[in-house]
Structures are given as C-alpha cells and as structure tokens.
C-alpha cells in the first residue's frame, strides 16, 4: 500500500475500567503527542453517584439503556432498595446485576418494559456518546471516524460462577494457541454480552477485554519489546483487577487474574513468582476469591520468563518486585488505549503503514 492509498484515520479508543475510563482520540495527520487524551471517572462510578443522588432525593428509579459493568452501580442499586425505594428495570440493563433474571428479581427489582409513571429513568451503559459529542463540540474537536473499545466481560453465565466462566474463556484461548492477535474482535463470541452491548452503541468498533488491552499496550514499551522474543511476564495492576500474562513473541503461555483489593505486595510477589515458575494453581487463586490461573502445559518452566514489565494505576503494589515499570509512549494511564489502537491497526491491515511501537506513528 502506497502513502497515497493509506486512509486517514481518527481513532477513538476507550478503555472502560472500574475506577476510570481512559480515552484517546488520535488523528493520523498528527503526532501522537498531540492526540486528545482524557482520564475520567468510569461509567460505573458516574452512574453509581447518579443513583446515590436519587436515593438521597427519595426518588423511585427505572434502569434503562443496556448491560454495563457492575461494581459501584450494583452497590448503589442495592443501597437504593435498602432505603425502601423502588427499583424498576428493563430486562437488558437488569443483566448488569446478574445473568439470572430470577435472582435479580429476588433482590427486589421489578422488571418492566417501560418506565412506570413517577420513576426516574437511569440510563445504564459503558459508553456515553452524547457526553462525548458535547465535548467534541465544546472544544472544537473533529469527531472520530473509527472506534476501539475495551470492557471487562465475564461472559453470560446464569448458573456457573462468573469467575469460573471467565477463566474457562481464557483457558480455551490458551488451548487454541494463545495468539496475541486473537485478543481483539470485530464480532465477539455470543456469550460476551457486555461486548455485544458496546457493539450496539458503536457498531463498527473493534473490541477487547480491558485486561488484555493493557497487556497488549504494555508490550509497546521499548523494554518489553526488547525481551519479547525470549519471553517475559507482563502485569497490569488495575483499580479493580490485576491481570498477568506470560508472553513470548506473539503467543501467550499463561494467564493470571485476581481482584486488586484482595492483594498485598507480599501476596502479589508470591503469586507472580510462582506464576513465572509455572507452579501457581488455578484452584488456589479461585479459592482466594480471584478469577484463576491458567498455564499452558508446554510452558518452558525450566527456563521461565524472568523479565517482568508492570503497568496499571495500582502498580505501587508491585514496588520492590524486580520489574520494569512500563509507560508506553510516556503515558502509563493510556496503556490500554495504545493496545486498542495497535489491535485496530492490525485488524485493519494497517499496522505497518502507520506503525506503533517498533514502527513509526
């Protein structure tokens, strides 16, 4: 493809976490340093606070919109019910509270097709396009043309523990070859319903899990690239989840995931050391209320991947662990967005034209 044939891009990458949503709008006519960059409260934080205000106002509410990430939203909904107030919900957004709607109703939530009179609608969703459009207008920024979105999707699992189900997804990924390129989707598997909800809002987007977007972004750090052929451990310590991967070239050999709030520096160091050695068990992490640990049986444990790269907003948990603290393109908080952008360029066949990381950008 010649330079005259390379299309102009305006990619909006949104990495939706539990604490923040990290946003990068990059125009291919500009240096990356001039891109629009935003670190904002996560949608679950914003909507959770919105519900808390309505609780204080003693207002009944109706959940509309789409399935989204839970956490603070679910906590606020349960506090609203505990205050003796009504919570109605349309079936789609009600799945935010759980994949089994019978159990959702047992919480005291009434499922409805339309908001009842007197109930204030609360729109759920991982993306607020209206708010972003206002921002582009207010700051005279041209709107995006292409989209890449990362959310953490546990998968639709009305009976099985969502932690178990999510790690079954990762175990299947490893069995199928663990290819880095397989971590991004244009059409996600049908059981990844949170991604599907995002695709309803942004039909042309490519999608990734937040955890693996962070891993892919961290691999763009020059120190990570220098060790990728021999193998390395990449750790993304997020506000809600800590995710680690054993990576060599373009293959993942192992995956580990835990809840960040349950980790201490000593526990994390112990887990990472045994993960590198290939001796950490899935059951131990699950019983510790984490998600799990999966290691390919052919992982070369006799020559484990010792070099470690760490990223994520809670990286202080790993202080003292022998590691390189990655900040691809000089911006730690946009690591997931850079991973999304790399995946978008690769899926579009443009990776070598625009470059990222070891190529130009």
Image (tube, helix red, strand yellow):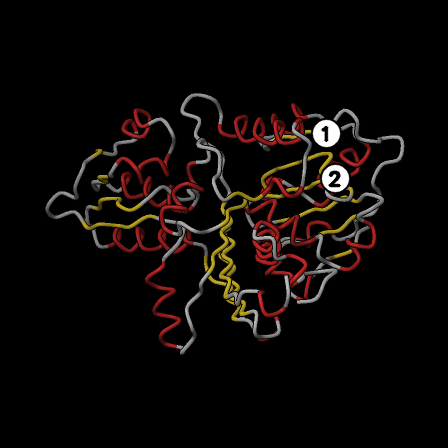
Residue for badge 2: 246
Q: Residue furthest right?
A: 302
Residue 144 on image: x %, y %:
44, 65
Residue 7 placement, left or right of 46: right
Give the crowd class for mark 1: few <14, some 14-19, many >=20 residues within 10 Å: many
- Quarter of the figure with residue 67: top left
Circle 2 sits in a helix, a strand or a loop, which is it?
strand
Q: Nearer the viewer, residue 24 or 20?
A: 24
Residue for badge 1: 295
Observer able to see residue 313: no
Figure check: 24 above or below 279: below
Give the crowd class for mark 2: few <14, some 14-19, many >=20 residues within 10 Å: many
- Quarter of the figure with residue 88: top left
Q: Are marks 2 and 1 in contact (CB under 8 Å)?
A: yes
Residue at the image point whose x is 22% and y is 50% from the top: 121
Q: Quadrant of the N terminus?
A: bottom right
Residue 59 placement, left or right of 181: left
Residue 308 on image: x %, y %:
79, 48
Q: Quadrant of the C terminus?
A: bottom right
Residue 226 placement, left or right of 30: right
């Amino acid at each position: 493809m010649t330079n005259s044939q390379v299309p102009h891009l305006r990619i909006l990458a949104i990495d939706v976490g539990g604490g923040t949503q990290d946003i990068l709008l990059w125009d291919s006519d500009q240096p990356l340093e001039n891109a629009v960059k935003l670190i904002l409260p996560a949608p679950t934080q914003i909507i959770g606070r919105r519900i808390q205000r309505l609780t204080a106002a003693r207002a009944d509410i109706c959940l509309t919109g789409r399935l989204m990430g839970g956490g603070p939203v679910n906590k606020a909904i349960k506090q609203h019910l505990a205050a003796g107030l009504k919570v109605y919900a349309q079936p789609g957004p009600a799945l935010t509270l759980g994949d089994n709607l019978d159990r959702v109703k047992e919480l005291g939530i009434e499922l409805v097709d339309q908001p009842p009179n007197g109930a204030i609608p609360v729109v759920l969703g991982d993306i607020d396009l209206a708010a972003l459009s206002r921002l582009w207008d207010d700051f005279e920024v041209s709107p995006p043309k292409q989209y890449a979105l990362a959310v953490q999707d546990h998968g639709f699992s009305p009976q099985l523990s969502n932690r178990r189900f999510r790690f079954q997804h990762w175990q299947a990924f490893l069995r199928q070859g663990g290819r880095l390129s397989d971590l991004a989707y244009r059409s996600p598997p049908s059981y990844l319903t949170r991604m599907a909800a995002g695709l309803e809002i942004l039909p042309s987007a490519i999608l990734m899990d937040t955890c693996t977007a962070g891993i892919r972004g961290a691999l763009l750090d020059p120190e990570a690239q220098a060790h990728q052929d021999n193998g390395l451990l990449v750790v993304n310590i997020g506000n809600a989840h800590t995710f680690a991967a054993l990576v060599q070239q373009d293959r993942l050999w192992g995956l580990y995931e835990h809840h960040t709030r349950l980790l201490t520096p000593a526990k994390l160091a112990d887990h990472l050391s045994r993960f590198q050695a290939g001796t950490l068990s899935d059951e131990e992490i699950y019983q510790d209320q984490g998600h799990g640990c999966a290691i390919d049986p052919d992982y070369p444990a006799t020559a484990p991947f010792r070099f470690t790269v760490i990223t994520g907003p809670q990286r202080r948990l790993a202080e003292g662990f022998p590691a390189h603290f990655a900040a691809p393109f000089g911006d730690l908080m946009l690591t997931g967005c850079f991973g999304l952008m790399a995946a978008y360029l690769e899926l579009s066949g443009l990776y070598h034209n625009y470059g990222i990381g070891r190529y130009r950008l």
